Amino acid sequence: MKKIDFLLVYPRPTSDSPVKLTPLSILYPGAMFEAQGGRVAYFDERYDPPEMLDELIREAREIGVSAFTGFQVGRAARILKHAKRINPSIVTGVGGHHARILPNEVLAEPFVDKVWPERQYGEDLFPYSRDKRLLFARGDMQYFTSVGCPFPCTFCALSAPWSPKPIDDFDREMKIMHADLGFEEISFSDPNIGFGAWKGEDGKTQRMDRAQRIRDIGRVMRDLEVRWDGNIRSPYLTSEMVDVLEESNCFSIEIGCESGNDYFLRKVIKKGHGVEHIKAAARNVRGSGISIMYSFISGMPRENTGDAARYVRPDRLDQGYRSQRAHFSLSVCALSGQSDVPRRRRWCRWVFEIRAADDHGRMGQPQAHGVADLLDRWFELPHGQHAQKFSRQGLGTYRALRQTGSGEMAPPRRR
Ligand code: B12
Ligand code: SF4
């Protein structure tokens, strides 16, 4: 009999990123399998040696890899092929955003037996225990104060009902982990840390004041003398909120600007706010003790090369962006042809927001005609309506993609 029921693997997410956050993507599902009585083992490709993986694979009944779209999918594919080679009876599964968004394409791969299609596994459990200390201690501490985000932004994988962790649970869990791990900084990866409305157990909508929620989180963090960073929507960054964040030991905040074009923000990606909110957020943060990361996306479908350069230039948006403490992140959409995804690595070009997806594996390649359908799915548009509706946005790349129908990328149109 095999000694391990579930071997959970976190493949390297990028080739180069200095960010090494806690692999919560496998720790929560692991907590769930353990709660069901399963014997679980973990492997984090960023730290653990390949010989250890081989040994675990030989002992495991089932292997589940986590993967989000991009480089990590390539690593996941390699690991699963390898697992089948050295233990042909092992059951192979894939979980995470990529498998959820493209379950059929992933399942079509010969080395994949099943996908885990749900958005969450075990997130109601406390994933830390002493025997998992190493898995938490060797990277940068990451945790959540809430899950989900109810906004309908068309490009985002995180859209789901919001639910805050009760503050007493958060307090207790942070204290247990801090006592064992002694971290000084933590990254909260909540999709939307300050939303404030959710459905209670009775099905009724509950509300909380978002500034008060941040104050409550801040009380816990101040007690522990831990600084934190997180993500927030621009409209929430009022001057009151900036003061509250400062008091709450927040040292850095990221806002998803995505574009400097109101038409794109409101009509195409349905961000729920316009450029004015981003400018106001920039003004409010300026001069505070908090550093800010402005995150943009370039090369979205219906945006041509000229548009991208014009709209994401931060200095055109507001002088506040020049703050010394500001950083910028620019994700390039692989569909655009501006991305640095090498042309021959075509397996991933149809997926949104890929930078440096330079791995060798492939998983979930779309079938013929898959590209157009995928785009329609991402942008939730009735089939065939986009071309007319958005013609003034520079449709070159998108049209070319639709016409090829085979998933092959035509060169971007120049204007
Ligand atoms: C941290 C992070 C990163 C880190 C990752 C490394 C790390 N861990 O340190 C870094 C900074 C490197 C990064 C980079 C990028 N990221 Co990122 N990142 C995140 C972030 C903020 C947190 C991920 C996380 O740990 N979540 C917590 C866990 C618990 O959630 P989860 O992974 O979804 O896992 C749950 C389920 O999916 C499922 N599950 C997952 N795996 C498995 C496996 C099995 C077997 C089972 C049963 C279940 C299961 O169970 C888990 C528990 O419920 C998410 C946003 C978010 N809040 O989730 C974006 C996110 C994952 N990133 C995203 C993107 C787009 C990127 C970039 C491509 C951006 C860019 N263009 O540069 C790059 C990738 C670069 C590349 N080379 O490919 C997208 C992915 C969308 C997609 N289609 O996959 C997300 C979802 C953000 C978004 N708004 O859409 N990112
Ligand atoms: S507000 Fe942010 S986290 Fe929420 S759906 Fe939009 S992009 Fe995603």
Image (cartoon, grey):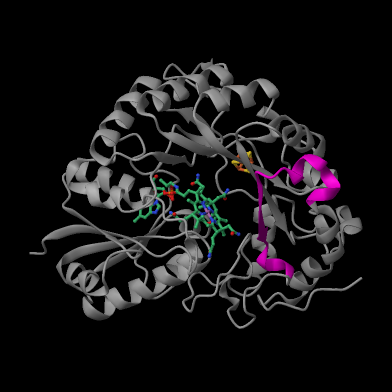
At horizontal 69% and vertical 25% (from top left) the residue drawn is: 238
Residue 280 higher or lower than 215, as above or below = below
At horizontal 61% and vertical 40% (from top left) the residue drawn is: 291
Start-end of magenta stretch: 314-336
In this rendered view, identify the residue nearer to me: 102 or 329.
Answer: 329
Using the rendered view, name the quadrant where residue 36 is placed.
Answer: top left
At horizontal 63% and vertical 75% (from top left) the residue drawn is: 368
At horizontal 51% and vertical 16% (from top left) the residue drawn is: 204
* Coordinates of residue 113 in the picture (x, y in percent): 34, 67
* Coordinates of residue 285 in the picture (x, y in percent): 68, 33
Horizontally, is 20 left or right of 148 in the view? left
In this rendered view, identify the residue nearer to me: 404 or 168.
Answer: 168
Horizontally, is 340 left or right of 188 in the view? right
Regarding residue 189, the answer to whether it shows in the image is: yes
Using the rendered view, name the quadrant where residue 370 is placed.
Answer: bottom right
* Coordinates of residue 292 in the picture (x, y in percent): 63, 41
Q: Quadrant of the C terminus?
A: bottom right
